[in-house]
Amino acid sequence: MKLQGNAYVTLICFTAGLGGFLFGFDTAVISGAINFLRNQFHLSAVMEGWLMSSALLGCVFGASISGYLADKYGRRLILLSSAILFIVSAIGCAIAITPAFLVIARIVGGIGVGFAAMVAPMFISELSPAKLRGRLVSLYQLAITLGILCSYLSNSFLLNYASNGAASASSFMHYYLVAEVWRGMLGSNMVPALLFFIFLLFVPESPRWLVKMGKTAEAGRILERVNGKDSAESELFEIEKAISGETGSFRQLLEPGMRVALLIGLALPFLSQLSGITTVMYYAPAIFEKAGLKAGSAMGSASVIGFFNMIFTLLAIWKIDKWGRKPLLIWGFIGLSVALFLIGWAFTRESVAGNVLLSSFIYYIAVFASTLGPGVWVVISEIYPTKIRGRAMSMATLSLFLGSTFVTQTYPILRDSIGVGNVFLLYGLVMLPAAYFVKKYVPETKGESLEEIEHYWKENTKLSSIEQE
């Protein structure tokens, strides 16, 4: 019996969401390895920043070309390509003998992340019914948080394994899991990457892309399995109507109504990264060690953060289609500002206990995971016309990774020059104008079909829930 309706689309979205899991796992797994790499290769602050941000540079490149590739060759093929890149990167990281080789392997993985990060939420958005779209796209963010948590747990397990010296001195496993345990940490990404590739072999193409390519009958069959025959016919008609009126050119984004959508897609992802979320995920164990915790307990504290990241993302999935995107983003930026000031204050007071710092980080993660984490991905996946959605969302994802790269590259330098506490205070200041930006420019899009959102931009009319507050 074939799956139908919500069960079918959830299964498809879950598979695409594995790209988010790999995104989180691949970008956060370096957090457990960085101290070993710093000691083994005698890394300077600049080289450390380069090694940490090399994957993000790959993300920038991957995101910059994935939109064009996804619009030309389809969403599914690019997701398959990202899985292959993840596998190659994991092998390269495990066998790297120099920092340069490791950087190249991390860049390859970053390209895979760039592909998956751009295509997966768009793919989910294009397959989801309007009433469930926010929830299902948020599954992508949940997958990212689960990947981050699993990377912390995997690193903690391998660190304990290495500390006990479980493998014999002459064994092959000793080299990868004990003597240079960072190789096992960075190479463990291969397992979920293989699963991602296998699952993708059973996933259909996006029906909206199929309509764009003239494969209407195939698109109709997929929509029928998602929404039922009657709804599928109606939705197929709306998709064809919307696509027939699109130019398929980037100039469409420069039309009067679409300029605000372009501004939102470029500014919102970048501002979300200025919250320092990448710094927290990359440097969590190192940050806690700097606060006075030992390596093992620091990794455990990082795992606690990863756990709360996942739990509060579940809250966002539950409520985003009820609360709406705009309130979630506004209160997210305000809440993050408060959290970052608390973290900065805790670091500037030497007498503050480690549990106070951990509590501040948990509050920070709770706010980000329940607001900006899923909210940004949902907004940028639904505000663009179908014919250019791939390329336009590619620009939005590129902006997100440029923000991540900027923050990750500058953190070690700022940390060494002004101190960890002042870095987080600086991040907190930036969040206040970001909240104003959302209030002024971002419309509410909950409950609307992608075609209705597109009509809103073109006609500059207020349709049902799409209203500026």
Image: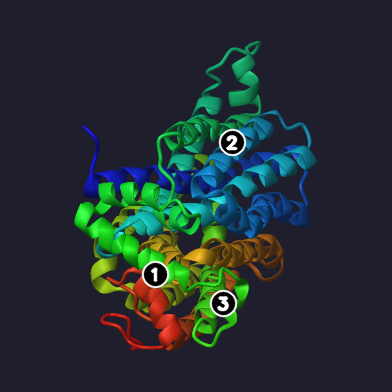
Element on which disc 2 rests = helix
| Location of residue 451 by image quarter | bottom left
Judging from the image, the colouring scheme is rainbow
Give the Cα separation between the discs numbered 3 and 1. 16 Å
Count of picture labels: 3
| Amino acid, disc 1 | Lys
Element on which disc 3 rests = helix
| Location of residue 270 by image quarter | bottom right
Q: Give the label on residue 241, or none.
A: 1
Report x, y in % for residue 449.
32, 69
In the displayed structure, would residue 106 be above or below residue 344? above
Q: Is residue 366 visible?
A: yes
Contact between labelled residues 3 and 2, with CB atoms less than 8 Å apart: no
| Amino acid, disc 3 | Gln
4, 102: nearer the viewer: 4
In the displayed structure, would residue 367 be above or below residue 16? below
- Residue at the image point whose x is 60% and y is 45% from the top: 112
Q: Give the label on residue 84, or none.
A: 2
Q: Earlier in the sequence, mark 2 or mark 1?
A: 2
Q: Label 3: which residue?
A: 252
Contact between labelled residues 1 and 2, with CB atoms less than 8 Å apart: no
359, 129: nearer the viewer: 129
Give the Cα separation between the discs numbered 2 and 1. 36 Å
Report x, y in % for residue 82.
57, 43
- Residue at the image point whose x is 59% and y is 32% from the top: 187
**For discs 2 and 1, the disc positioned in front in the rendered view:** 1
- Residue at the image point whose x is 28% and y is 44% from the top: 8
Contact between labelled residues 1 and 3, with CB atoms less than 8 Å apart: no
**For discs 2 and 3, the disc positioned in front in the rendered view:** 3
| Amino acid, disc 2 | Ile
Q: Earlier in the sequence, mark 3 or mark 1?
A: 1
